[in-house]
Image: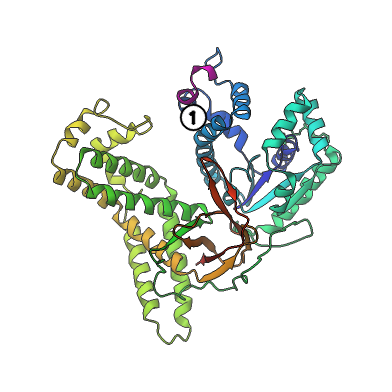
Amino acid sequence: MLKIGLTGGIGSGKTTVTQKFSALGVPIIDADEISRELVQPGQPAFVEIVNEFGDKVLKSSGEIDRQYLRDLIFSDAKSRVKLESILHPLIRLKMSQQIELLDNPYCIIAIPLLIETGQADLVDRILVLDVPRELQVRRTMERDNSSAEAIEAVLNSQVDNQTRLSLADDVLNNSGDIEDLLQQVEALNEKYKVLVNPQGESIEADNGISNNKIKNTDVPQQKNSPNLFKAAELFIPPGDEIVYELPLNEKIRTLVRLESLFEEMEHHLKGDTYWDSRSAINTFVALMNIFSRPEIKTDMLKELDRINAIVGKYTLKDMPDDSYIKQVQEEVNVAAKNLRSIDGQLGQGLKQNEFIMSIRQRDSIPGGALEMDVPAYGHWLNKNIESRCQDIRIWLSHYSQPQQALNLILKLMRNSGVVCEASTKAGLYQHSLDTGIANQLVRVIVPKGAFYFPEISGGRQRFTVRFLKPNGFDRPVQIEQDILFKLFCCAL
Ligand code: ATP
């Protein structure tokens, strides 16, 4: 499904536009609406916000006073960071869940702070509402009966229109009347329908509305075939380099998360204290939570089948040494067969395990389950370390086939990237991707100990690497120097 991220400043016309798309039958995912739901009593963010900011954020009705919070974050940057750290991951999760449920060629995801919160990677195209500042102020004043100063303060906290436009694939100009805006939406709907094929895959086409300003600056675009087997050995950076990765889609993002949890688990299993075992259990519950999503098994199988098809094509070619291809083919076949052999959901057997399920059920308690919540847990934690580790290893074995599959997919994925040297202009590097191939992961490698670090954002069609330097504990700032770095675009 093609995901269109709609963004624009305060009063730019986002609601007007989403209402029109909705009337045209396009599904809408609205970050503001999700945020409002998340702070309702009983919802996950409610307790965290009250714990963080105290009872003063509550109205007499017991609901969160959103206006109070809004005023607070505009006057206090630290509160803003705290609130964002509670809300943004939850909003992102909820949006991903809603996207997974959709079955439409394309959808609109309205995220007012799409650029500011670095969520561009969640969408395939960025649609920006362009409107002169004075009109924005006037329309918002009329709508909200608020002062120009208050609206200016909000505008000053948002990214400026030029930056937004520089990242736009499509632009709606809202300087005319509403009828004019709605006509542009209709034209755009036709364009998006052309951009998606019946299978729901997006293809690049340009009927003149596109305003794709980002062009590859330094590295030639990848040609039509992925560099699947260029590197027979996985590139391992020397100890004096650090790899920063950005998965370009949600599926790979989930696999990378799982991979990290498995690594974390191995670390905890090396320890022999009470706390090591508690940490291992917390990690295990996180693994269970991700693996309980029904789509993961299908997604991995599809990915393995897709890789198999690519491998098949390679073997038809006249390759001087096809031993690596054969090895990959065998590994992929084994991983797919093992995964298919699992009946039902991944880790299904763990549902019979009363002990681990009772700990998992209390996972939403801040800090996780304690002995007072599950006394049997306290008893288990007092067993000797060998039996604790043995129990965990047995539970982990429920996920050994999925782990094998995801390790293989990620290994082949990372293997498919060819390293090249790239350079920034004043700390910024922008790169358009060939949409004819499945770009899945970007890896940026910088020297260990560098004073800067890369912030990678983007989606299937392009990505941006912004090099930043820490600014105490305030928002990091973009560096001004031109620097060289190593870049991998991994496409399988
Ligand atoms: P916010 O960021 O505050 O949620 P928004 O981007 O959703 O705002 P809208 O609520 O759609 O913006 O529009 C702001 C106000 O401007 C509304 O009252 C809307 O009816 C009005 N408006 C939008 N576009 C036009 C237009 N082209 N001509 C006149 N009024 C407009």
Residue 167 picture location, percent across and down: 68, 53
Residue 170 picture location, percent across and down: 73, 52
Q: Residue at x 36, y 81 (%)?
A: 323
Asked whether mark 1 and ligand 1 are closer than 8 Å, the reply comes as: no
Residue 51 picture location, percent across and down: 45, 24
Among the 4 quarters of the image, the one containing residue 408: bottom left
Secondary structure at badge 1 equals: helix
Residue 440 belongs to the span the image colors magenta: no
- Give the color scheme: rainbow, by chain, secondary structure or one colour: rainbow
Q: Residue at x 51, y 32 (%)?
A: 82
Q: Is residue 193 above or below residue 24?
A: below
Residue 56 belongs to the span the image colors magenta: yes
Q: Which residue is mark 1?
A: 45
Observer-nearest of 174 and 448: 448
Left or right of residue 286, residue 438 in this image: right
Q: What span is colored magenta in the figure?
A: 50-57
